[in-house]
Image: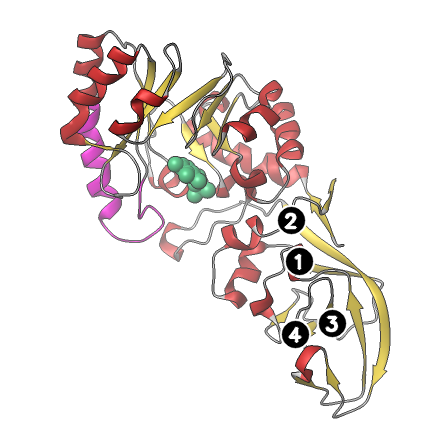
Amino acid sequence: MASIILNKNNFFNNLDIIAKHTKAKDKIALVLKDNAYGHGVVEMATMAQEYGIKKCIVQTEKEALLIESFFEYILVLADFPSVMSDKIHYTINDLYTIHNFPAGTKVELKVDTGMHRNGVKSDALYTAFARIKEQGLILGAVFTHHRSADELTSEWFWQKENFKKVKTQTRELAEIFGFTPLRFHSCNSAALFRESAFDEDMARVGIAAYGCMDLPAALAVKGLRPVLSLKALKISSRFLKKCERVGYGGTYEITEDCVVSNYNFGYGDGFLRTLSNNYKTQQNIPLIGRISMDNSSFVSEDEELLIFENASYVAAFAGTISYEILTSLKSELKREIV
Ligand SMILES: *Cc1c(COP(=O)(O)O)cnc(C)c1O
């Protein structure tokens, strides 16, 4: 099994850049869902705490409980409470689920401003507030999510305008129903960096903190550095002659006599099989043959191989995004902070 190396300097460098945009460390809510984008949730929470991050975001309550002691505020994006915790806040994603939250739960209302994935539509805000009140919930914030902040189109402006109207409407509703002061947030990483004068209560930052944003050149953010790299160890080596073929199905044929080694990392560890015969490390070492469950072959003799230092680089080969490369990495992989 390969191992993951987490670079603390790079993480803190990224948090410095993010904090400049939010204008305060305290406005950063670090997104730690899906095992902190594959990085390891406890490892990232430990470093985030050391840096002074007090807020984080996860998908489920189970994830929240794993890292409860590291933060003052945790927002759960999609789950219902089974425990009572002063730190955990739950998202209302739909009018029809409001009755699932026990009285006294701290909630935040998600509003659908155009993505049409989760959230209450803006014509149902009065009903939402009335039901939240009736259920005895404590509403602390209203938020939304952008569908195209990472694309060079006008959609980001359109959604921002929609959320501006929602803010005006919900500020009035908060007065009526007694939920003041209401907090607001809408920015993921890409949206935060498009904002020249960020003035919301917090930003929900994931991929920028991990240093793997894949953005069009015009939106690129300078100075972010990948936190995660991955190295594998050699299991065995062999000398192969021209025309011998490697791996399941013999899909790769050797073109020149060479040494081929097999490393302890495969699709069972989260290395996408679609990279078979379709990858070179950043040091230009080709992966040959099919990736197996726990093995992959490279034209190399090295005892240790740096499989990648930047998930965005791998994503380009696989025709996917850095998020998928990172979250595919299994939680069982060894993780080391340097
Ligand atoms: C995952 C997620 C984020 C973080 O997005 P990044 O692009 O990684 O910054 C923010 N908000 C919500 C609602 C999310 O689901």
Residue behind mark 3: 297
Residue behind mark 2: 330
Spatial separation of the CA atoms under disc 1 and disc 3:
15 Å
Mark 2 and mark 4 residues within 8 Å of each other at the beta carbon? no
Residue 179 visible, this orientation: yes
Q: Residue at x 56, y 20 (%)?
A: 71
Going from N to C along the chain, the mark reached first, 1 or 3, is 1
Residue 188 visible, this orientation: no
Q: Is residue 149 magenta?
A: yes
Going from N to C along the chain, the mark reached first, 4 or 1, is 1
Residue nearer the viewer, 24 or 276: 276
Mark 1 and mark 2 residues within 8 Å of each other at the beta carbon? yes
Residue nearer the viewer, 306 or 114: 114
Q: Quadrant of residue 121?
A: top left
Going from N to C along the chain, the mark reached first, 2 or 3, is 3
Amino acid type of the residue that numbered disc 4 sits on in the rendered structure: Arg
| Span of residues in magenta | 146-168
Q: Whole-percent x and y of residue 5?
A: 71, 46
Residue nearer the viewer, 49 or 93: 93
Q: Is residue 28 left or right of residue 265?
A: left
Q: Which mark is residue 247?
A: none
Please tell me whether residue 215 is drawn above or below residue 277 in the rendered image: above
Residue behind mark 4: 290
Residue behind mark 1: 268
